[in-house]
Amino acid sequence: EDKVVQSPLSLVVHEGDTVTLNCSYEVTNFRSLLWYKQEKKAPTFLFMLTSSGIEKKSGRLSSILDKKELFSILNITATQTGDSAVYLCAEFLSGDKIIFGKGTRLHILP
Amino acid sequence: SQTIHQWPATLVQPVGSPLSLECTVEGTSNPNLYWYRQAAGRGLQLLFYSVGIGQISSEVPQNLSASRPQDRQFILSSKKLLLSDSGFYLCAWSDRDWHEKLFFGSGTQLSVL
């Protein structure tokens, strides 16, 4: 059974739209929630979230964690074609174990 | 600056043959090291991780094994490959001061035929 569940698995929107990607996780041994972006081969780090309700922001990307409901969202505003990628959510667990979800494949149409 | 080297980039192997994928990190010491596998259209499946020399945690061993013979070297091996071992293998490291931020290698696309 998957411990990190992302939705939707794929999403196609038009340039300029705002998208919200979802991630739910399990609480056992949880330390932090991570977001990564995979454009071609190597994923790159976006955010680390440890506290509920505190938004992390980087340009048009933002993310927030809800530790009561065990989920996180990643928002992208004013999307651009360069935002097309697979967005991966992951749990950082005790013992430095990092578990990823299946990812959301985002495609931005020009 | 820190860099990670993973090779080969592409590998085609027959069923039953051995496997050795190597990953080395430069510019840091005592990193955490990880091996992931990514099947087409799937997320990253954690295979092995190591928080120090000789310390290997296994998630889905089956016919794969991992070793860390040196501080910054992580090797993924198999004695006999299966068709189901095909996939994209990614090595990653994280710094001791920021464990959550993984830096990934460029990956190895393995096809077992």
Image (tube, coloured by chain):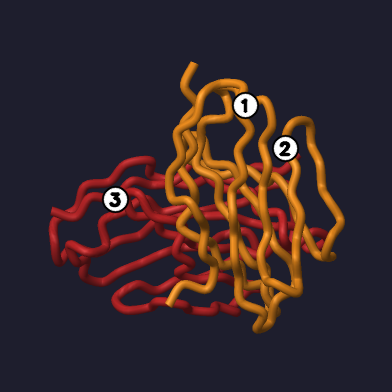
What is the spatial separation of the Cα atoms under label 1 and label 3, in whole angstroms? 34 Å
B98 to A59, vertically: above or below: below
* Residue indicated by mark 3: B110
Q: Nearer the viewer, residue A4 or A68?
A: A68
Q: Residue at x 70, y 62 (%)?
A: A33
Note the chain letter of the orange one: A
Q: Nearer the viewer, residue B54 or B37?
A: B37
Q: Residue at x 54, y 79 (%)?
A: B57
What residue is disc 1 on?
Answer: A79
Disc 3 residue type (three-letter):
Leu
The chain letter under disc 2 is A
User: Which amino acid, by three-letter code, is at mark 2?
Assistant: Leu
Question: Which class describes the residues within 10 Å of circle 3: few (<14), some (14-19), or many (20+)?
Answer: many
Q: Are marks 3 and 2 in contact (CB under 8 Å)?
A: no
Mark 3 or mark 2, whichever is nearer to me: 2
Colour chain B appears in? red
Q: Are marks 1 and 3 on the same chain?
A: no
Residue B85, above or below A75: below
Which quadrant of the rendered structure holds the N terminus of chain B? top right
Viewer-side residue, B57 vs A4: A4
Residue A61 - label: 2
Q: Is residue A24 left or right of residue A72?
A: left
Three-letter code, disc 1: Thr
Q: CA distance from mark 1 to mark 2?
A: 9 Å
Task: Indicate the position of residue B70 as horizontal and vertical percent values.
Answer: 60, 65
Q: Quadrant of residue B22?
A: bottom left
Q: Position of residue B9 (x, y in %)?
A: 38, 41
